[in-house]
Image: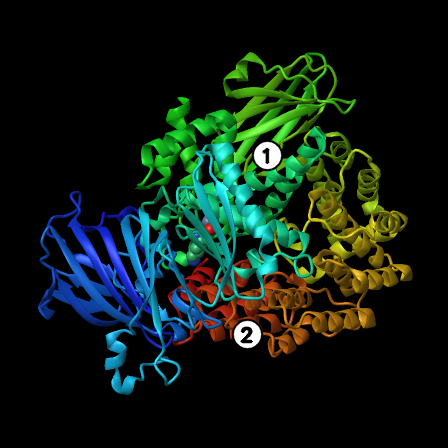
Amino acid sequence: MRTEQPVTIRRLDYTPPSFLVDSVSLAFDLLPGGTRVDATLALRRNPVADSGAPLSLDGEELTLEGVWLDGEPLAVGRYSLSESGLEVRDLPETCTLRIVTRTTPEANTTLSGLYVSNGNFFTQCEAEGFRRITFFPDRPDVMARYRVTLRAPRERFPVLLSNGNLIARRDCEAPEWLAAAHDGEAPGAGPATPEAWHEAVWDDPFPKPSYLFALVAGRLVATEERLATMSGREVLLQVWVEPGNEDRTGHAMQSLVRAIRWDESRFGLELDLDRFMIVAVSDFNMGAMENKGLNIFNTKYVFAHPRIATDQDFAGVESVVGHEYFHNWTGNRVTCRDWFQLTLKEGLTVFRDQEFSADVMAAQAATQAGAASARAVKRIEDVRVLRAAQFPEDAGPMAHPIRPDSYQEINNFYTVTVYEKGAEVIRMLQTLVGRDGFRKGMDLYFARHDGQAVTCDDFVAAIADANGADLSQFGRWYSQAGTPRVSIVGSHDARARRYRLEVRQACLPSPGQPLKQPFHIPLVVGLVGPDGRDLPLKPAAACAGSVRRIETAGGQVSAVLDLTEASQVFEFEDVAEAPVPSLARNFSAPVVVEHACDDAQLAFLAAHDSDPFNRWEAAQRLATRCVLAVLDGAAPAGRSAPLVAAIARAIDDPHLDAAFREQILALPSEGFIAEQLEVVDPVALRAARDAVRGELARGLAGRWRALVHDLGSDAPWTPDAATAGERALKNAALAYWVDSGDADAVATAQRQFARADNMTDRVGALQALLRAGGEPREQALAEFEKMFADEPLVMDKWFSLQAAMHRRPGDPPVLERVRALAGHPAFSLRNPNRVRALVGSFCHGNLAEFHAADGSGYAWWAERVLELDPLNPQVAARMARALDRWRKFGPERQAAMRAALERVAAAEHLSRDVREIVTKALAA
Ligand code: B3K
Ligand code: ZN
């Protein structure tokens, strides 16, 4: 690998492309050891660009075989070739350019561009992988129509897929260049006897940017379904997998059908192709990719069978299938002008997939209250992710606005900020203009921009214009990084019967942004009266202009407040008795709310708030305070009493469903608590959190035992939300019960482990046994490994659970185990799922062990990053981020972390990806 000089790309430097590509025809002769790509581009000078500008084509790791202009070989003096592309001068206003290149898919370990996985061909082009396939203006604002011919040996590659519609399939001659290759032995040509070749021709009727191009070729089988869309068009849906995996595709197919129906009913958006394909691949850098009509998926988000997949995995499949399908409109039909606009498609599409999953869960509930609770559970899960991963990102060296201003490597900016915070920004827009107003805005967005490559400003303008709303200040969410802190002081004036909220907002500096302007924050609040019910809300005249609306639904009364100033006061009239305020209901904005209240008030909200999200939130705050106090030296037993009581009440509440109760009793993560501290000692933090857990475990041991017995069922596994919630609650209870030290608990977990007919209960039992430690732990791990040795996705769980495990008294450091696992035959640095399971789970997911005081974790991290970088820079850069927050630790750990970062930064050959991460970490 060459060492790349860091070049910073800036949003404000955007210039339109000098040429547009109206259509492109690609012919592939596919062989793993050497693939030939014959590309013909119909070019037209861009009327809005500089008239004399040369044509600039991106290209990386390509061997150029020839260039022809309008049929004639192009003189060498007319173009220049560099490591990053091809520049062609003095072109006519319109012309065709034919370019023939060679690549070596089997040598491509980066999994970007065209590569081979398990003998089959796959592509990944977003963000800049297409340039590794052919020379092209590889930027999203160049949208072209594609016609693709795939030729390959028929026996080895019976299935040939690309975007759009299949228009021809036939047998064909082996390509001439192959026969011409010396002795007929082209690299990777395979058997000595000549192979029979075949070809398929695909045509995609919709112009698309190059990042949405895809091809797949190999031995695959499809499950199929036909469906009539809302306008009555019949479409073919296919899920392609390697033979033998057909029985794992049902849930993905059902999820796809549900996603199609949901987009029709919620947004009036219809599938626009005759055929929609999902293909599963086991070597993949991320979850999945929304290539037009040919989504390529990590097997992790396709395979769902109760023997190998947990309820969480089933939910993950549904949400990723939905996400990629929703991109067909938000991303593909309307795409991004440049990569700085990434959240235009990603934030919006995450918001859509979150709403989809919430609606599907709610639709399964029997009652309205059940539906509200199901929605709250989904919201809680999403907020947990945001707080655990995005808040730290927003406070660290990689902090960036959801629309970044600069990058060195765009793949480093597929972040929780762009995705999850981006989705929160879309959600706030919906809160501001209301659900119907948001739909009107979406309709206008498509009416204006279908078929275009646009900016985030275009999106916000459509929402604003459709609603006559002023969203100018709201735009700061796109330009300012950081998590705003909203501090609120509430006071009641009994004589005047008024309740007053004094609200201040502030946001700490982030890299390149020393000062922040106030954000436009929708703050949804309610006032809970002494009887536990919401009070009616009558805003005082003085603040009425900043009260957007009052919402009343069921027993819930909430005000949507517009925070726009650094400091504001809101007053409500006719409030006879002091209420407890319920703030930022349903997590109405991605902010930290600071509000001084005592344990009793939190316990009151946890028991009574009409907003289920805030019931959970109150319990979490109670738990966080408790862990922080113990960390500060408080005696765990005494300090945990209010929390134990609140959780007991939630467990006993007959109105709460199982999934929601499980959320209430799960303590905040170590990562979340760590963010509340100035200086983190992860070992002390784990001890404090485990001490509080121990209080809950022992204090409620009887309840855990009862839950495990009441919810343990011999009925066969079913995938519905209700039984999934019960399994989640039962397994959480089992782990607490084991923590209580009751020997019956371990025996129960062992029984469940042996007898489970589904992965949720198997893994649930295994997790409990990991907490038990000793022989029961080792036996279960060995048994699990034997059972699932042939199931890579399940082995990922096995790697991951061990890498993330807590040490029991007498155990050696977890790093010792992790080192051994890195040498396990099932582990490979070439497979991103394995890397995430072992390296990711240890470095990102096991705070106390990774941050062992002797710095051994950091040294191991540096070795893995350096080993992985030449193979797969994108995944290496993800792992490299484990040291982002190094300044948050004590001086000794800081020194060891800095040394590890410097060691990586000093490496002679480093990818642009990893270099950007480590230099930013060191600079902060
Ligand atoms: N758009 C892809 C992500 C591509 C990542 C490139 N490094 C998947 C998704 O967000 O749906
Ligand atoms: Zn996406």
* Quarter holding ligand 1: bottom left
Q: Quadrant of the N terminus?
A: bottom left
Asked if ligand 2 lies within 8 A of label 1, the reply is: no
Left or right: 824 in relation to 348 = right
Q: Is residue 262 visible?
A: yes
Q: Relative to 348, is 499 above or below?
A: above
- The span from disc 1 to disc 2 (Cα, nearest Å) is 48 Å
Which residue appears at 71% of the width and 46% of the height? Answer: 624
Q: Is residue 399 visible?
A: no
**Residue holding disc 2:** 828
Q: Depth-wise, is mark 1 or mark 2 nearer the camera?
A: 2
Which residue appears at 49% of the width and 27% of the height? Answer: 432
Which residue appears at 68% of the width and 69% of the height? Answer: 788
**Residue holding disc 1:** 487
On the image, the x and y values in percent for residue 183 come to 27, 87
Q: Relative to 855, is 440 above or below?
A: above
| Secondary element at tag 1 | strand
On the image, the x and y values in percent for residue 399 come to 47, 51
Mark 1, residues whose alpha carbon is within 10 Å: few (<14), some, or many (≥20)? some
Quarter location, residue 89:
bottom left
Give the amino acid type for the residue marked by disc 2 in the picture. Ser
Instruction: State the residue in front, 848 or 402.
Output: 402
Mark 2, residues whose alpha carbon is within 10 Å: few (<14), some, or many (≥20)? some
Give the amino acid type for the residue marked by disc 1 in the picture. Ser
On the image, the x and y values in percent for residue 576 come to 73, 14
| Secondary element at tag 2 | loop
